[in-house]
Each structure stands twice: as C-alpha cells, then as structure tokens.
Amino acid sequence: MTIRSQLNLLTAVVIGGSGFAGWSAFEARREIEAYDRVMNESMETRSVLLLMEDLPYHDDTFRRLNLEKERLKEPDRKQAFNSAVKMYAAKNPLELRRAIRKGLRVEADHFNKNRGRRDVIEARFEKLMMVSLCILAAGLLLVMLTVHAMIFKSLNRLSRRMLDFLVDRYSFQFSQPDQSELGDLQRTFNSLAQRVINTTDELKRLDSAKSEFLSIASHELRTPMTSIKGSLSLLASGVVGQLDVGSLRLIKIAEGETDRLIRLINDLLDLAKIESGGLPLHLNWVQWDDFCGKTLDGLASLAHKAEVRLELVSLPAVEVNIDRDRLQQVLTNLVSNAIKFSPKGGAVRVTLSRAKTGELVVSVSDTGPGIKAEDREMIFEKFRQGTSAANPLVKGTGLGLAIAKALVAEHGGSIGVESTVGVGSNFWFSLPKWRENEAVESKSEAA
Amino acid sequence: MHILLAEDDPAVSIVIQICLEKIGGHTVQLVGDGAAAVSLASREAFDLIVLDGMMPIKSGLQAASEIRAAGVVSTPIIFLSAKNDERDIAAFLKLGVGFIPKPFEPTMICAKIDTILDEAQNGTSNRGAS
C-alpha cells in the first residue's frame, strides 16, 4: 500500500468518525434545548398556580389570570388552569384548592418526566463529545506516527546511505527497497550509485592500465637506451679508435639527442610512479639554507654558461620537513627553467618567505620573457609547454612542471606562477611543514 | 682487475665490457645468466663480480648467495639494477658491497666501481654510488 493511500484512508476514517460523533452531539444538544424550553414552561405554569393559591379573592386578579392563561401552551395545562379559574369564578374555595393541587401534581409529573429525559440526553451528549475528541486526537496521533514511520524514517535512511556512499562505496545499496513511493527513490539512488561506481571503476582501471603501460614501456625503453648511449659515448671518447671530424660531429648530435630521450623516459617513469602513488616520500627535517645552497651549487655551471646570476634570499634558521631528493628535483626544475629563459646578464632569485596563512613559500623569479596569461595554468599539465617565441632553442620534455606540481602536492603544498610578459616570471610553491630552529640560529651567530 | 660480468642483455653487456676493458683496463669474462655466473665464479678466481639484478634462470641475488655458498666469500660483488626500492637496496647490500642503479652511463662504470670499492675498503657507508 502506498503512503499516500494509507494517509488518505486514515484521514477519511478520522474525519468520518469525528464528524459523525460531532453531528450526534449537535443533535443531542438541540434536543436538550427543546426539553429545557418545555421545562421552563412548566416551571412558569407551576409558579402561576402556586401564586394563585395565595391569591385574595379579587376581580383584578381574575382578569390577570385570564391574561396569563394565554401564555400557557400545552392543552392539559391550559385545561387545569381553566378548571382552577372556573372554581375561582364559582367562589368555591375547596374545589379551587383541589383543582390547584391537581394542576400542580400534573405539572410536577410533567416536569420530572422531562427532566429525566433531559438528563439522559445530556449524558449522551457529553459522551458523544468525548468520543469525538478522542477520535480526533487518536487520528492526529496516528497520522503523525505514520508520517514519521513511513516518510521521515525512510528519508533519514536515504540520507544516511547517501552519506555512507560518499565515504564508503560498499554500503550504498538498498537491498530491499520500501514498497512505498520512497522505494522508487531508493531504487533510483541504487542505480545512480551503481553508475557512479561503474564509471569510477572504469576510470581507475584505465588509469592503472595507463600507469602500468607507461612503467613497462619506460623500463623496456631504458635498456636499449643504455647501450645506445654507451656505444655513442665510447665512439665519441675515441677509446675504440679515432674518428674524423665529420663523423665525430654526427656522433655528438646522436649522443645529445639520446640524452634528451633518456631524460624524457625518466620523467615519464617518475610521473607514472607519482601518479600511481608508488613513490612514497622519505620525510626528514632539513635545514633550508643548506638544502637550497647545495641545490643551487649543482646549477652553478648551467647559470655560468648562460651568464645568469643566481641569488638567494632566505629566512634565518628555518627547517623544512621534506623528501630531500624529491624537493631538490622540484627546485632544480624551477631554477634551471628560470636560467634557461633568462637573457644574458639576467638574474634568477630564489626567495624564502612566510605567507599570511603560515606556510613557507619558495619563489623562483627570473627576468625572462614572461608567460602569457592563457598559458599560465596550462604549463603545469603534461606535455604542455608555453608558446615561447623568445627562446625556441630551449627544449624540455614538457613534463618537468607536471612532476614538480605532483611532488609539491605530495608534500601537501601548492604550486603556481605569476608573470608579466616582458618583465619576468615568478614561480612559487608552498611548504606547510616547517619550523624555526633556535639552536641552528645561535650556532651560526656564534660562528 | 679480473672481472666476472653477468648481464643478460647482449647490447648492454658488450658496451659495459668495452668500457671496462678500454677505459678501466680490466680483463672481463662475460656470461649471460645467473647460473653461468655461479659455475664460472666457483671455477675461476676473480677480483670482482658484477651481477645484473634481473637475469634469466637465476636472478642476481640468487646467483650471489649461491656463489657465497660455493665458498667464494671474499670476492666483492656489485649489483646492477633497475629496481631501486628500499627493500631491493637492502637485499643487495646484504650480499654485496654495493649496487649501481640503472640506467647509468656505461662510460662512468669504472669510476663508480672504484668509488664503491674505495668506500668498502675504508669501511665507510657502502651505499650504491649513483
């Protein structure tokens, strides 16, 4: 039975029951009023008769009594009154008294009889009123309970399942949907959830297949690359025999391109590993100045070759909780990019600062050509490079920033870029886990 | 030095052999799988054994433990491996003096081997040189 039909039936029963009881009570009330009227009349008659017994024998009184007679309605009362008046007229006191007594007795009987009936009806009226109220109250209670049991409970169940589904995919199903209208809702929810799960599973499967493919492909590519690179290096170094200048030039080109291919394969494998969560971080507390200094030392020759100055602006005695190798990869990527895009005589500045949110922010700013607004988001995606007309010779794998983004995210931070075309770019990333180390500070001051 | 090199990929093994011979001036005996490495190591004396981690028939680790079991206890063993998780590294360092992670530049292999042997001799950390 649907909730709607149950509620309709219940409401009809309540309205019908309380309506019938109410109507009966109303009828009883009217009957009571009718009896009240009759009893009032007989009270009046009695009072007239009692008045008459004490009357002095007087003509005025007789006339007044005749007028009073008109007010009496019932024929037998009128008759009793008439005979009493006749006795009065005949001036027979004895007869008159008897007639008055008889009239009083008749009226008293009449009155008592009516009062008895009225009391019975009044009791019935009270009972009916009570029943009507009870039916109404019970009906309301039933309606409330029904609504609660069938609608609110089901709604609660549904919203709980929905919340469960958000956090845990396995408890979503309504194995036995309700028979009511809410059952449809539950069935709809079941199929929606199923669709979401299917889609998610499919996506996960595709993603893991992709990661696996990348990983296998990268491994399979590395082995031949090792021997190609080794052979070319051996040829170029001349240990297996001297080469003429032309051949040597070609071998050098092949060696350089092999290096590029190896870098690309390494980046691909790295990214596949990070994305599949197969690259757990080895977090340690590292002193920032030491870490940053060593990273920049490794880039000094590149900067020297490009005739770019490297500057370091730091906060005193800051320690960061990082995976040293992985964050070095990030910083190296950003700084070497900045060097590559800076003009001769330019400067690359690595700044450590504290954000308002409490995080540490590492910025790498350059004096390069800048990045167009439409490219700024895109450059962090795989194989997407900015459309740089300024330096077409700068070749990268297109994966460096994607890897940097993934690694910074693994550290709980975020990465971004601000740039003005023609002025320079400022790449930054945040590190949420850091502390100030007083011991290091005092030691360095002492030194 | 007289070196035993076990590596299954023929191209890689020839390049490494040439590097070791031409750059390092060593003599090299080349085998293509773990089982051949075990039998050769137990027959002939070497100054150094270089084993690839993943080889047919017997893996590098398996070959190393069998070489040790066959009574060759003092010859240093170096592994070449593309697998370089913490667990793999720990297993390599238990049986050998060090490991060289793949991919590496073949021309650098002599320098890396020297570094590992030096560190092992000086008793310093014998982690793989990279």
Image (cartoon, coloured by chain):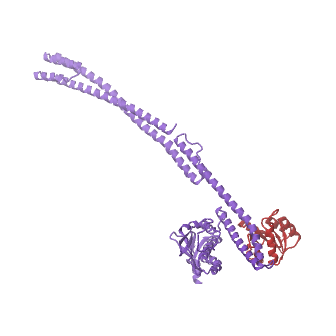
Q: Can residue B93 be seen in this view?
A: no
Q: Is residue A96 left or right of residue B14?
A: left
What residue lies at 74% left-to-right and 64% top-to-bottom? A220
Q: Is residue A141 above or below residue A343?
A: above
Q: Is residue A254 above or below residue A172?
A: below
Total count of labels: 0
The image shows residue A357 at horizontal and vertical percentages of 51, 69
The image shows residue B127 at horizontal and vertical percentages of 73, 73
The image shows residue A368 at horizontal and vertical percentages of 57, 76
Q: Can residue A28 be seen in this view?
A: yes
Q: In this view, does A119 lie above or below A305?
A: above
Q: Name which quarter of the figure residue A118 lies in.
A: top left
Q: Residue furthest bottom?
A: A447
Closer to the camera, A236 or A42?
A: A236
Closer to the camera, A127 or A339?
A: A339
Q: Is residue A211 left or right of residue A187?
A: right
The image shows residue A101 at horizontal and vertical percentages of 21, 19
Closer to the camera, A179 or A46?
A: A179
Q: Which residue lies furthest to the right in this view?
A: B43
What residue lies at 15% left-to-right and 21% top-to-bottom? A66
From the image, state the color of chain A. Answer: purple
Q: From the rendered image, report the letter of the chain displayed in red.
A: B
